[in-house]
Image: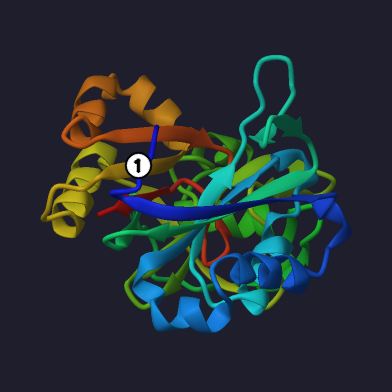
Amino acid sequence: MAMDAGSVEDVCVQVVENIGAELELRDVLNGMHAHFGGADEILANFERYVGIVLFESSAKAEEIFMDRLGTATDLLFVGGSSSAADGGKSLVYANGRSYTGAAVLAILKTTNGYDVLKTQSAHIFSERKLAVTKSDLHNRILYEFDHRPCGEVYAEVLGVGQDEIQNYFVCNPLGVVAGEEIFVRTFNQIQDGGITLHCGLPEGTEINVLKIGDIVDDTRKALDEAISYEPAGVINFNCLYRTLEILNKDQVEPYCALFGRYPSIGFSTNGEAFFGHINETSTVLVIK
């Protein structure tokens, strides 16, 4: 996608390497703010500035990085993590180089503003709240809900045998529910007496078990509600699990037709960035 001055007036790109080291980001963001005249300029024209973040996913550092990014700037950053190719490599690219263990940050100064929408096609399956009482956040392993083995409780909520739960990880993910917003976390595989996650859950978090709905229909509703104008461009960070579900249900053509209405580009991501690290979500940046 090419962005012209009619839609994006200026951009600042910065690469942050070794993100697994839990770096302090304030100096990086202060430098990026200075490119545009300082934080005061950005705050005075907040509706025109937006950030993009692209993670190399093998570092498994997105949760902490997004938390530290939020303390270093008031700007909204959206984006996603790279999905490994067949060779197992997962890369991000900027300024003529590719990187592992890194994040690429970009701040866009838009000419006419922007919108961001998030749709996860996930709905609450059970109203029962489950408290995370034992987890390994760094390695993204969940051990206990309500002081009981998490697999046992998950099977209980679904009403299936514990030996069947692996079949439900994608169609019944977990969700942190905040009002009408749902932030999805998906189980990956049973391991070391617990279950690994694609996005970590800290102890003390309350979750609901979710169910996945009609991705095409839910995405259409979200786009139609958010975009009532002709956008200059649309960037879709779409979870790889959603891509696989679209493929499995032979919905590629109707899904692509939704974005064919706009100048658009998209990625199949290994987790999405929107006020944190989430997955099974489509996070969409719309440039006006």
Q: Considering depth in this image, is 90 or 157 the residue closer to the camera?
A: 90
Q: Considering depth in this image, is 226 or 193 the residue closer to the camera?
A: 226
Q: Considering depth in this image, is 189 or 114 the residue closer to the camera?
A: 114
Q: Residue furthest top?
A: 87
Q: Residues within 10 Å of mark 1 (few under 14, many from 20)?
A: few
Q: Residue furthest right?
A: 21
Secondary structure at badge 1 equals loop
Residue found 23% across the figure and 37% down from its top: 216
Residue 145 vs 151, above or below: the answer is below
Q: Is residue 175 visible?
A: no
In this figure, which residue is indicated by the disc labeled 1? 4
Q: Amino acid at mark 1?
A: Asp
Q: Residue 257, how many percent across, how many down?
A: 19, 28
Q: Residue 92, how many percent across, how many down?
A: 67, 35
Q: Residue 181, how many percent across, how many down?
A: 37, 69
Residue found 68% across the figure and 73% down from its top: 30
Residue 207 vs 284, above or below: the answer is below
Instruction: Describe residue 155's horizontal placement relative to residue 67 as left or right.
Output: left
Image quadrant containing the C terminus: bottom left
Instruction: Describe residue 19's horizontal placement relative to residue 70 as left or right.
Output: right
Instruction: Describe residue 226's horizontal placement relative to residue 66 as left or right.
Output: left
Image quadrant containing the N terminus: top left
Q: How many marks?
A: 1
Residue found 39% across the figure and 63% down from its top: 126
Q: Residue 132, how many percent across, how many down?
A: 66, 70
Q: Considering depth in this image, is 141 or 167 the residue closer to the camera?
A: 141
